[in-house]
Image (tube, rainbow, N blue to C red):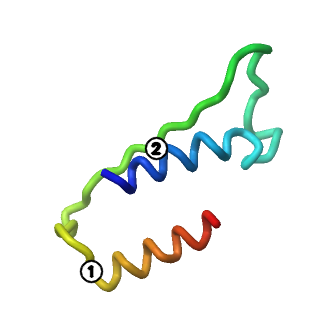
Amino acid sequence: MSRLIVLAIVAALTGPTAVRAQEVPVPPPGMEVYYLGLLNRGPAWTRGETPESKRIQEGHMANIT
């Protein structure tokens, strides 16, 4: 659940400026753009941290910072 919250916060903070202007229509004055990402646990999902999930999460956080 905490990864979903991180994704939602990142999406809210990056907004349309993270994407080239021609790809995102400009909202009318007074309106804001929000993005929502939905995560789905795949068939290989396991509870707990694995070396691979730790590596992926570290790379994800490095990309954010």
The circle drawn on residue 50 is 1
- Say which amino acid is labelled 2: Gly
Alpha carbon separation for disc pair 1 and 2: 23 Å
Q: Position of residue 57 (x, y in %)?
A: 44, 72
* Count of numbered circles in the view: 2
Q: Secondary structure at mark 1?
A: loop
Where does the C terminus fall, quadrant-wise?
bottom right
State whether residue 61 is above or below residue 32: below
Tell me which residue sits at (49%, 38%) in the image: 36
Q: Position of residue 40 (x, y in %)?
A: 30, 51
Q: From the viewer's perspective, is the residue at label 1 or at label 2 nearer?
A: 1
Q: Which residue is mark 2?
A: 37
Q: Secondary structure at mark 2?
A: loop
Task: Looking at this view, name the residue that lies furthest to the bottom.
Answer: 51
Q: Quadrant of residue 35?
A: top right
Left or right of 1: which side holds 35?
Answer: right
Tell me which residue sits at (67%, 46%) in the image: 14
- Disc 1 and disc 2 in contact, CB within 8 angstroms: no
Q: Quadrant of residue 34?
A: top right
Left or right of 65: which side holds 61?
Answer: left
